[in-house]
Image (spheres, grey):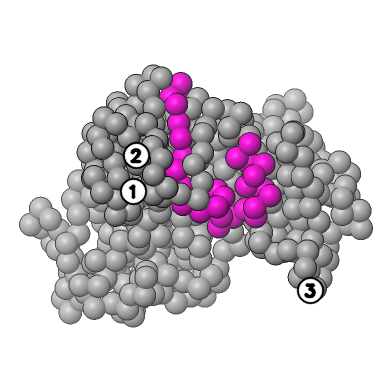
Amino acid sequence: MSARSVVIAGYGMAGARLADDIRRRDPDGERVRLTVVGAETHTAYNRVLLSSVVAGTMRPEVVRLHDDGWPARTGADLRRGVAATSIDRKARRVHLDDGSTVDYDALVLATGANPWMPPVEGLEPGPDVVAFRTLDDCARILDAAKLGAPVAVLGGGLLGLEAARGLAGRGNLVTVVHPMPHIMERQLDAEAARVLTRKLEELGVGFRLGVGAARYVSGDGLKLDDGTHVPADLIVVSTGVRPETKLAVDAGLTVEGGIVVDDLLRTSDGRIHAIGDCAKHPGAFGGLVQPAWEQAAVVADLVTGTKSASRYRGTQPVTRLKARGIDLTALGETMTGADDPSAEVLTFSDPAGCRYGKLVLRENRVAGAILLGLPDAAATITQLYDRGTPVPEDRLAVLLGRALPAGAPSASSPADLPASAVICRCNAVTKGRLVEAWRAGATDVPALAGATRATTGCGGCKDAVSGVASWLAAQ
């Protein structure tokens, strides 16, 4: 039986993960002949960790997902620096911008999303206006952000705040300009945002909230719509993204904000799948890596024939802010208030200590939480959320991380974790899987990452994996 031709259009985090998952299921290429097409010239890299590159805590080569030898090892036909331009659905052929074509039996669109540039007078991409999205963007930002120079970050969402913290840590005078009344309004309630803002201000980040940019003058800065002025030698734009759907639209696929897919991640053409930020599924949330990687596993099951019953049913969102000196986790229902009669809501606020906790319960289960400066509580509550486990009666002790329920995880006690405890949520790696990998010879954190993928997602589990590794080494 000849191998099927599977083409992946997009070599970002979703496309690279899918390629890996296909080869894990079909290591010798007996079932799948794999072609991967990517517009960027870089090997695949972890976009989630770009803020660490800007902050100077990670080198660009450290965030790579593949090395230069990956195509030879896997037998994949990797075409970097080449973009797909059109799809001939009848001929089952993809046309590329170098004039070549590639035929497919199954095509997967993993084209991601593009940064949105707000319509501000004078704001055009250039040496001093950079959208924060790619590894090349990081290089441009670092080249333009001279030490001590003023920088304005447009956008007070997750990525904008990570960039702002990184630049402030490098010695820049950073001001975040955000048109909403508070930062991270999609994930945080007003009080949590107030506490986080105070913490970031202590770390050197300034804020202009509730106002928008009206005009940019290169070498001068931003004029805001209230008439005030923000000096800036560099503008970092992080105002959201738009799914990249042009290929799908031109091919006549159903697109409604994103490429519409079903539980098999199929588009309106059954031979074409879509995953990641370009795809629209009712159970997925854009901008997070976990849904994309869960989707990749499903498509890999299907195109290799490994598990024909595999389906994507959605992802429970967990958001973590990756900024040095800040520990923030937000999950599930974060906007539910105490006035909701169907929910039990507890809150704790300590602005002076830069701590905030919110726990939302429904039918004695965690439905949502915001945990700032409470790492032990975050570890416990995330586990309760993932498992749907009943919450102990002492709610306040759980919220503060001071009295953990029997069998629940403690951030500082790997020995107390059950084997089923999820350590790396992005990759669904349990403590038991780490122990197995250690016993098989992966006896340090890099080796554990290579064997299990733990730490290769958002990076938020690195300390936990290190803790498990230290515990195992002491046995």
- The residue under the point 37% across, 70% down is 257
Is residue 456 visible in the rendered structure shown here?
no
Where, quadrant-wise, is the N terminus in this rendering? Answer: bottom left
Which of the labelled discs sits on residue 342, or is there none?
3
The tally of labels here is 3
Sort mark 1 into few (<14), some (14-19) or many (20+) by Cα contacts within 10 Å: some
* 177 drawn magenta: yes
Q: Residues within 10 Å of mark 2 (few under 14, many from 20)?
A: many
Q: Depth-wise, is mark 2 or mark 3 nearer the camera?
A: 2
The residue wearing badge 1 is 214
Furthest residue in direction right, as rendered: 393
User: Which element type, helix, strand or loop, lies under badge 1?
Assistant: strand
Tag 1 and tag 2, C-beta contact below 8 Å:
yes
Which picture quadrant has residue 216? top left
Which of disc 3 and disc 1 is earlier in sequence?
A: 1
Q: CA distance from mark 2 to mark 3?
A: 45 Å
Of labels 1 and 2, earlier in sequence is: 1
Location of the C terminus by quadrant is top right
Q: Residue at x 40, y 63 (%)?
A: 275
CA gap, disc 1 to disc 3? Answer: 43 Å
Query: Disc 1 and disc 2: Cα gap in Å?
Result: 7 Å
